[in-house]
Image (tube, grey):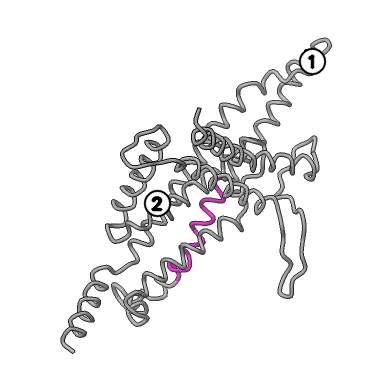
Amino acid sequence: MSKSNTRFKIIDILLLVMTILPPVAGIVLKVLFVPHSDGIEITGAHVFASLDLPLMPLIISEAQINSWLVMIALAFFCLYLTHGIRAHVDTKRAVIAEWIVETIEKLVTENMGEYFRGFAPFICSILALSAFSSLMSLLGLFPPTSDLNVVAGWALLVFFLITYYKMKCGPLHYLKSFGEPVPFLAPLNIISEVATPVSMAFRHYGNILSGTVISVLIAAALQGLTNLIFGNLPGILGQFPFLRIGIPAVLSIYFDVFSGCLQAFIFAMLTMLYIGGAFPLEDYLKKKAAKTEKRLNT
């Protein structure tokens, strides 16, 4: 085996290890610092530290830590997928990476138009971050999407992008848009503008959190039912959780896997539709063409 092949495989192994290491670190942090509860306890993210700042304290919680762990893991996974990719060389990872890029670019182009083709990396990041943040619950970790602050930050970023593209034709054009289709609807349009990030945040947060709460309540109910039906059996049989085998796992496929991925897709779709629909492309192109013509005439 040549030195280049050995070096290539070593880097591959290191990238895979760095992809797996963040979730493992999250599990270790939870075991060491998050108090264990024997009964039903539905709380928010555990607070690791609180730093006093002039305006308000900076809270460092499970949601923030786990968000960074997901981002680090995704970054190294992307490096693994793209490691060693060369033109006209079809490897398994190259095919996977190419499929992801082509699928996201097609999705963005169909929903936002050719002008926003460069938005594909941003939409892919939102999809991956949201989906894998929700899937953290499969490892027993607090999913960052169950924290309203995290999802509200994403929605606020989308709101800034919506406003930015609405103002591409100038502040006056932006203000006039609130009076469409008729001026007396301006108050409703303003409320709708503010409600966009609020609805995006609460929709995502509420669906993920409700799934987690329902899963915990069903698991606790199954434990109680097991004790009621099989509690009189002798020895260890009376303590064995018969009804908690299989049923919570099946429910987890929906609440943790399907629902988490679905909400990630919905959030990404809403992002594309809101930004693409807010941008007055025709007016922008006309204004750009007028500026170009004026510059050429002068």
Above or below residue 118? Residue 246 is above
**Amino acid type at mark 2:** Met
What residue do we see at 77% from left, 57% from top? 49
Q: Residue furthest top?
A: 234
In the orientation shown, which residue stands out farthest toward the left?
297
Distance from the alpha carbon under mark 1 to that under mark 2: 49 Å
Along the horizontal axis of the image, is 28 left or right of 139? right
Rendering coords of residue 181 (x, y %): 28, 72
Q: Closer to the camera, 205 or 231?
A: 205
Magenta highlight: main SS: helix
Q: Which residue is mark 2?
A: 269
Q: Position of residue 40 (x, y in %)?
A: 75, 38
Q: Report the disc number at residue 153.
A: none
* In the image, residue 206 above or below residue 173: above
| Magenta stretch holds residue 192 | yes
Q: Which mark is residue 238?
A: 1
Question: SS of the residue at dot 1?
Answer: helix
Q: Earlier in the sequence, mark 1 or mark 2?
A: 1
**Residue drawn at x 38%, y 57% as measured from the top left:** 119
| Magenta stretch in the rendered image | 191-208
In this rendering, position of residue 51 left or right of residue 253: right
